[in-house]
Image: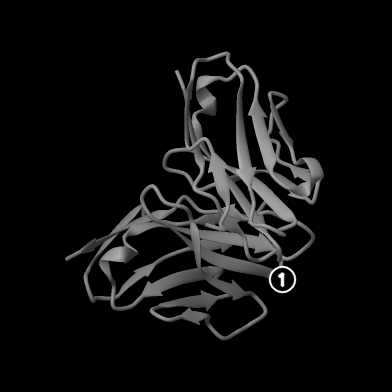
Amino acid sequence: DTGVSQDPRHKITKRGQNVTFRCDPISEHNRLYWYRQTLGQGPEFLTYFQNEAQLEKSRLLSDRFSAERPKGSFSTLEIQRTEQGDSAMYLCASSLRVHEQYFGPGTRLTVT
Amino acid sequence: AQTVTQSQPEMSVQEAETVTLSCTYDTSESDYYLFWYKQPPSRQMILVIRQEAYKQQNATENRFSVNFQKAAKSFSLKISDSQLGDAAMYFCAYRFNSGNTPLVFGKGTRLSVIA
């Protein structure tokens, strides 16, 4: 499968714990996006990378969130000191052209 | 700020019939793109169709077509000859055509297809 992959697919954690998600974009896609999707809502933009540079960050991305894309390949999204409000689906998308974003299956986070 | 509104939380259609999903958006920009994405249950989101705002002709992709009314800021999706595999959440999305601006999504419409 050469699509966008995300790991893990599901994560259950206790409030206050740290979690890290990984996204592997489609090979040679230089753009990578993270979105968050809560129940009953459409995806909301979190952050954007072009190659290894993080160029955009939403105000939704609090200080507890950090994202990296070392060497412009895979990306990680870390949430520190998780809160129940962080429970959501975290989607990754990649693209070569700005108007064609390919989404991964998402990581569903449940904070208990 | 740009917003996208989908006023139909749920829709249903009989197999082989036609259904139209509504979307309106708010923007002061003139150069932008509009999209419809499909998110099947427990599967990843895929792009269904894309419309460039400067093109007057409505986009079509096989059984999927749009009715783009720029002045009214309306962007509806028509699905013809509905199939069971069309059952999914459908999201309307907007992107301002400048730099690396992200997609702005509506809340989605859940489409059920009745056999």
Residue A30: percent from left, percent from top = 75, 56
Q: Is residue B107 above or below residue B38?
A: above
Chain of residue at mark 1: B
Q: Nearer the viewer, residue A69 or B88?
A: A69
Residue B63: percent from left, percent from top = 38, 79
Badge 1 is on which residue? B31
Q: Is residue B51 above or below residue A78?
A: below
Give the image's coloring scheme.
one colour
- Name the residue at 57% across, 13% down: A16
Q: Residue furthest front?
A: A1
What crowding class fits label 1: few (fewer than 14 Cα within 10 Å), some (14-19), or many (20 or more)? Answer: few
Side of B45 where A17 appears, left or right: right
Residue B26: percent from left, percent from top = 60, 60
Q: Residue furthest left?
A: B115
Residue B24: percent from left, percent from top = 51, 63
Q: Callout 1: helix, strand or loop?
A: loop
Q: Is residue A37 visible?
A: yes
Q: Is residue B53 above or below residue A47?
A: below
Q: Quadrant of the C terminus of chain B?
A: bottom left
- Name the residue at 56% across, 57% down: A3
Q: Nearer the viewer, residue A8 or A34?
A: A8
- Name the residue at 63% across, 75% down: B52
Q: Residue furthest bottom?
A: B57
Side of A2 where B96 appears, left or right: right
